[in-house]
Amino acid sequence: MALEEKREKRPPVTPMMIEEEAALRNGSRGLPPGPWADAAGPRPRTTERHIAVHKRLVLGFAVSILALLAVTMIAVLLSVRFEECGAAADGPPRAGGNGSLSGVARQPPGAGQPLDRPEEEARGGEAAEEEEEEEEEEWQPRRELPPWARPRLPRHLRPLHYNLMLSAFMENFTFSGEVNVQLEVRNASRYIVLHAHRMHIEAVRVAEDKLAGGVRVARTFFYPQTQVFVVVLNRSLEVQRSYNLKIIYNALIENELLGFFRSSYVLHGERRFLGVTQFSPTHARKAFPCFDEPIYKATFKISIRHQATYLSLSNMPVETSVFEEDGWVTDHFSQTPLMSTYYLAWAVCNFTYRETVTKSGVVVRLYARPDAIRRGSGDYALNITRRLIEFYEDYFKVPYSLPKLDLLAVPKHPYAAMENWGLSVFVEQRILLDPSISSILYLLDVTMVIVHELCHQWFGDLVTPVWWEDVWLKEGFAHYFEFVGTDYLYPGWNMEKQRFLTDVLHEVMLLDGLASSHPVSQEVQQASDIDRVFDWIAYKKGAALIRMLASFMGHSVFQMGLQDYLTIHKYGNAARNDLWNTLSKALKRVGKSVNIQEVMDQWTLQMGYPVITILGNETTDNIIIISQERFVYDSDTKPKDPARGDNSYLWQIPLTIAVGNTSHISSEAIIWVSNKSEHHRIPALEEASWLLGNINQTGYFRVNYDIRNWKLLINQLTRNHEVISVSNRAGLIDDAFNLARAGYLPQNIPLEIMRYLSEEKDFLPWHAASRALYPLDKLLDRTENYNIFNEYILRQVASMYLKLGWPTNNLNKSLVQASYQHEELRREVIMLACSFGNKHCHQQAATLISDWISSNRNRIPLNVRDIVYCTGVSLMDEDVWEFIWMKFHSTTAVSEKKILLEALTCSDDRNLLNRLLNLSLNSEVVLDQDAIDVIIHVARNPHGRDLAWKFFREKWKILNARYGEALFMNSKLVSGVTEFLNTEGELRELKNFIKSYEGGAAVSFSRAVETVEANVRWQRLYKEELFQWLRKSLTQ
Ligand SMILES: [Zn+2]
């Protein structure tokens, strides 16, 4: 599963700069003459035309909203009628037996209620409670929880095979199903407990395989607390026999983002609907009764009956299709190999496709809305998918396991994508790509999401984690391979060696440096908690630990180990110790002996990470002192586990170290640091030589030095930075900024390091600086001395901005391949220049926007469009906002839509920002998954921060109802609107809100409080120190 990346960090234009540049507000007229002023021509007024366009838009909305209301009412009516039919069909409850079906005449949890009912209402009826109490009495004397009340399914049964027959009624968004589960009995029991949630069960039958007779069903009930359905039998099922459980049920195709849900798109002015599934991690139980835990692998045979105007898809290819006279068809899919429920999938849609075939004969198809397929928007994804399957087959030495792989591009999805085996689902913005209007960044996003999901076909689908505590095993690998796989496609990009650092390592160390972090392996039991494990710690820390491991094992041994691991555990489950054992054996084969489990347990079971301090010893030559402690941003924060102070944290750290002087750096040596403090002898440590730790930043930790060594390193960077590798240059920048932010280092050190950037021609160090500056910028952007900081940054950026200039041409494929680093560097520098208010940058953006409006031709270079749009909206008048708003509605290209929407959040007009916030919750205007981005982007804008924060608090109930179940989205929202709050007043508001709010996202809120506390603390302790140094530096 790929989460939405926030790869891009664009500090919105700052308040001071906007005032200075007020002249730009009336188009580009009144600009002072400058070297580029000629280019900035006047712009015609466009208000009238746009007002007219607007009326049409408003009218269009009104009509579509009325239509939606009508459709919803019809659907509700139909579902009520359907519900009545269902209840009538139940008849009076009969005791099952002799193969007859026992009716279950009870109010099902949720079914029959309005389509959009909130989660908490989904509870069983009174009758169910009585049954449950009756059953519980039997368990009380035994002093144990009855099997249905335990957080995990009881282990006495195991599903071997499911036959699932579904009928999808797209006209009223309901479906009915019949599931036959073949069960193996491990311990005798009268109870069958399996997951089922939010469905109406019509009939249940239990029969012994190979025997005609049924087993009488005494009663059945739902137990909503654990989302299970319980079948109580008159007699025990016997050990080592196999039984068949048949359940007939029906449910809604929900208008939400989980389970079997619906979404829609418009084709030729007509709204079309589709149904698709998202089962990971615990939502298969909403679509069919099942043993919804990853350990219960079984085979599945699925049939889907639907109107012939639709097509249906599932994990396996269609074996036969049976057409009926009334315009219905049933597709029977081939049987799957052994697999877990969470990556089972199906879809009912009227998409079209294009296809390709791999060398080994796997048929790959990309399905999307017909207009996108016709435009060729899926071709890029299709092409790289074929190559990536070949890459993984070669890398893992295990062939892709299914005959086909379909990629499905859907308009609405809670995650960027989901790796269902053989039927991976992607949100359109992460798979469709129109080469004529996509930036490199967009291409990179699309590429990496596809690489990620394909990796899961092996890591996750073929070999599945035993339980969700080790979700990082699959997500960490898939995230790590995003970089390895992209390197295969674009060999010159050095993703694993370079971009991994800024996008993964630096990013997650921000999160994991909070005292409220959690270990990468975290225990979970309750279904409602399981979504919680899908967070950046699992993905990014998981990936960073895997990269550290690969690096100290050596990449070829690591690869060999993975091949063994996949071969041994294919079609089964594995826990982290299985991986460690296999990797240790691989190491042993090449004559190395490291107890990988012992090392890695410290990194996966302890939260946080260490900061290593390397101190030169003034009395004894060649001896250094290396110490480790847990890195935390706010040392005042009470540790989460008070029994465990920060002092007790220890890691076995593979510290690589090298010695350098003005022109040369030694080859690296590895030192395993496992104590609080150790002395080590370093040969060839001379007077003027410096030490550098964590070579190429392969380790998951920070390194600090004594001030003398920092000064030597700064000196080296200024004189000849190329002696130090690109990745270490980026690493020094990130470490210095964060060590200073946490108070381990004086505030001036990172700013002094930055000075060498005027000579830096590599993208990565600039990118690291830009990302590290971002939180600092947000800490300062509403302070009265902000302009001093701003001025300092502008000075560092100015010369490189002049040197690189603006891109002129649009990108073609060969150019992307060849000049990725250069184009990304230019983009980064332009972004910094425009964000911090470089006048030329502002003029250039305004000119480009004006040209677009007056000519109605968009000639803005693709790679900087988002920067230009945002800068234009923030500097120019309301017409530009309206123009972008209109373009947002009229464009059909998903990549363009996304950046247009984000640009709207850059305005400094609070009325417009409020209008946008209010519109964001209208699903007809802004897709559900994009609404969160709108709110977060408004919060990043200094003019919008308090608006977004207020909006968030006022709409919390709506937002929580909408995203509460997809916890990842909720926590992204919570951190997005709170992470830059930094005053005592805002901290109080946050705490008061948490006191008064009702339920949900508790973990996200405790993290938010700690972040804001650290922000407030930094303001109190270090802000003045920073400004003092900046003042002095600017006057020198
Ligand atoms: Zn994933």
Image: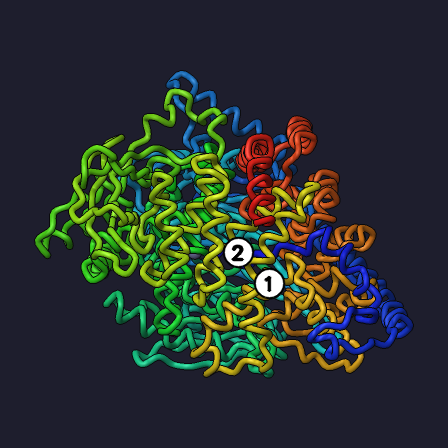
The coloring applied to the image is rainbow
Q: On the rendered structure, is 425 left or right of 604?
A: right
**Location of residue 424 with respect to 45 vertically, above or below:** above
The residue where tag 1 is placed is: 831
- The amino acid type, in three-letter code, at marker 2 is Ser
**Residue 447 percent coordinates (x, y):** 46, 69
The numbered disc on residue 936 is: none
**Location of residue 359 with respect to 875 vertically, above or below:** below
Note whether residue 328 is visible. no
Residue in view at x 22 percent, y 54 percent: 668
Q: Quadrant of residue 975?
A: top right
Q: Residue furthest left?
A: 591
Residue in view at x 21 percent, y 46 percent: 685
**Residue 976 percent coordinates (x, y):** 61, 46
Residue in view at x 49 percent, y 32 percent: 634
Where is ligand 1, by quadrant?
bottom left
Q: Are marks 1 and 2 in contact (CB under 8 Å)?
A: yes
Q: Quadrant of residue 120?
A: top right
Q: Residues within 10 Å of mark 1 (few under 14, many from 20)?
A: many
The numbered disc on residue 770 is: 2
- The amino acid type, in three-letter code, at marker 1 is Met
Residue in view at x 18 percent, y 59 percent: 557
* Residue closest to the eye, 148 or 741: 741
